[in-house]
Image (cartoon, coloured by chain):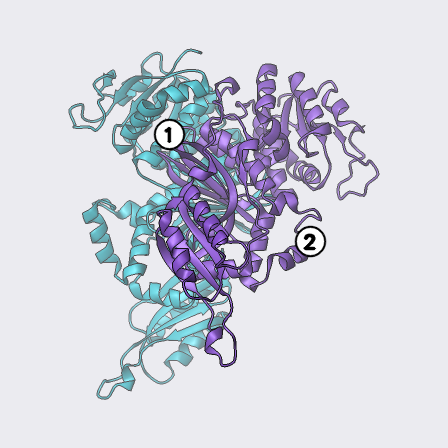
Chain colours: A cyan, B purple
Amino acid sequence: MSAALTIAIAGLGTVGEGVLRVLARHGDDIAARIGRPIAIAGVSARSRRKERAVDVSVFDWYDDPVALAASPGIDVFVELIGGEDGVAKAAVEAALTRGVHVVTANKALLAHHGAALAAMAEKGGSALMFEAAVAGGIPIVKALRESLAANTFSRVYGILNGTCNYILTTMERDGSDFADVLAEAQRLGYAEADPGFDVGGIDTAHKLALLTSLAFGTRVDFASVYVEGIANITAADIEAAADFGYRIKLLGVAQRTDSGIEQRVHPTLVPRGSAIAEVSDAFNAVVVEGDFVGEVMLFGRGAGAEPTASAVVGDIIDVARGDTPPPFGRPTKTLAPYEPAGMRAHEGGYYVGLVVLDRPGAMAAIAGRMADQGISLDSIRQRSGSHLRAGVKPGPVPVTLITHETTEEAVRAALEQIERDGHIVGRAQMIRIEPT
Amino acid sequence: MSAALTIAIAGLGTVGEGVLRVLARHGDDIAARIGRPIAIAGVSARSRRKERAVDVSVFDWYDDPVALAASPGIDVFVELIGGEDGVAKAAVEAALTRGVHVVTANKALLAHHGAALAAMAEKGGSALMFEAAVAGGIPIVKALRESLAANTFSRVYGILNGTCNYILTTMERDGSDFADVLAEAQRLGYAEADPGFDVGGIDTAHKLALLTSLAFGTRVDFASVYVEGIANITAADIEAAADFGYRIKLLGVAQRTDSGIEQRVHPTLVPRGSAIAEVSDAFNAVVVEGDFVGEVMLFGRGAGAEPTASAVVGDIIDVARGDTPPPFGRPTKTLAPYEPAGMRAHEGGYYVGLVVLDRPGAMAAIAGRMADQGISLDSIRQRSGSHLRAGVKPGPVPVTLITHETTEEAVRAALEQIERDGHIVGRAQMIRIEPT
């Protein structure tokens, strides 16, 4: 058996504890598999005295993760602290500049600094592995970086945030509204007290930025991701979408178009019965479309201590075997600058929800504004019935439209005019339709 | 840029041509990705003059693939000849004994000789890569071998043969019988003229034997796989299963049980709405259940020139990067002997189809034989109505039973008794139910 691979673990939250559990339970089998044991040289976390499910007193303790990363004799620094800057970044940099391999689950750090850190890793001859940063236990990073490297990709999309998918699934199942489901999810511990990163789409955007780089060979460019969260999706939207044969999912989509590469995170109508539409609760799924492989989908648990720990230890095993690929699958200096395609040029179908005042000519005016922009309608749904009941005064009526393929530019222009015309109550709802 | 990786390709059928197309279209991008070009040192196939979609006259031609494998200066021998013995085996052995890496799509060869060839590869210091041998473009081999290596697996199962899945999907959609759909599939070129390997389950068993080794760390043991094909599944079975909320799929299942590891290929009832039940037409899917990662599913095209070529070239890229893992993910000498669990000990629910003679006491006798074996029934379905029509003499009636969990031993014993009692016409149908 060869010399041990010595690792240092910074961050002992649920994922860090999960990694310790994997190594405690399967350490011997892993050593037999790779021909060398994995030794934990030291650990670091915010509080040494916090009660933990795993006994960490047997490991060398470091209060400062940067000191741990810089301590001598470390082969791999495992960063499970989180956060796009601060101590996580400093510790990863300390490791990489010393030629120490890094395994991380930190999507925010890589989304913001992935290109610079990859260059630093390459210069120091170290690996920068991050399977756990995207879709937890699902091996999508390695699939794009290695297994499917023979392909050119046209599109990569997925459900990348379990909290959002849980909320949307529950809203659909119970017919309940976003705020109620979110509150319940927070009570049960499924959603953070500050849910902005999840429901606002930022967490999905972090992961998407990494997938884009892996799939298209471009430098990570999180700032260019178009992001819309799910907070303004209503139970009525979900019901109307179902009526048209769709489900609403928060997708991250990276897509090559004539004008560049789209990176977008937003609620999306996907056809019921398609594989992605059937992904429910906290599960994640990623679909890649390659010119040779066709469509491949990977599905599983996208978060949680144990699936994420599975991914972290998978990366450690690769490093132990001496497999240290370039972070984004190709030499970092060959990564092309990301050329964003503007959202206004986006082409696709749209779901439009309007609450229309019940007066003569309202629908005609609305349809006219759509026609002015060259938008043709696939379906219209109007649900009311209130005027059929005796003594009920006609009131505003919810109207839902599904457009044929058009551009975002055209839809936005039409909706601005419609809002200005004053035939509707409040703002128009607009949700993109994603072909699957 | 480093020196070229020189490869030799033996077998220029659809997959071989697909590999040439990948390298022609993406060779430059792949070279930039891995820092070295891939050069084709020579090719071999049965007929030099056969008309091909790709011009092969630019490559050195070898009539004998063994001579090609043994020719000097070859880094990687790509075996796309097929067949469990004969020239494919001789050529692979010629490469491995010379320390030449092998990339192959040959599931039959590896199912029969995987353990011996892996040992040979290890001795010679060469890689033996076979992503393309299981589920075409779906990267399940690498996922089990590397990405998910932190897990212990309880079960791996999948739809591994596109022809069978196409036939079953079409039978369900059209309500047609096996023989008619098979004939149509042969006419369209979706099924081989000799369909025994596909519809008999042998092809699925070849692939399953490889997945078992990867998942459970055991020596490949194809001879121990229990195999039943789909030829005796009827349109009536599919309809009755649908009525109970199931679809019928040909699954390969490897599962750890108290008495050993089950390796079984047979038609299976899977609950409608489960991910595996929704895999239709010629698509493949593999589900793995790991103790940390939970359930992960990979879905995509399991055959065809282009998806399979994607997998072959993915393996070549790994070798070019210097990543040459042990063939089954751990040193071959540490692979444990496969300990088969006998099929009679298999535990699960069963679908039983009987054509019962319409006479007093028949159903009571049948139910009694089930009870004698301790089998309890979940559902019973009897469809006839003929005796309600005036002038129609009562005839045999199709009866379908779904059992609660029991053992194969018990079901077989009960059905033997039921057949012997003479209350039914013909043989009993028995299809296992797989929880998903």
Along the viewing direction, whichever of A355 and B12 lies nearer the viewer: B12
Q: Is residue B190 above or below residue A330?
A: below
Secondary structure beneath dot 2 equals helix
* Chain on which label 2 sits: B
The spot of residue B172 in percent (x, y) is 53, 60
Residue to which mark 2 is pinned: B186
Q: Nearer the viewer, mark 2 or mark 1?
A: 2
Residue at position x 27%, y 21% in the image: A43
The spot of residue A198 in percent (x, y) is 30, 46
The spot of residue A11 in percent (x, y) is 27, 27
Tell me if residue A377 can be seen.
yes
Tell me if residue B375 can be seen.
no
Would residue A243 appear left or right of B253 to someone viewing this image? left
Residue lying at the far bottom of the rendered structure: A390
Q: Is residue B270 above or below residue A130?
A: below
Q: Find the distance from the CA under tag 2 to the CA under tag 1.
A: 46 Å
Residue to which mark 1 is pinned: A312
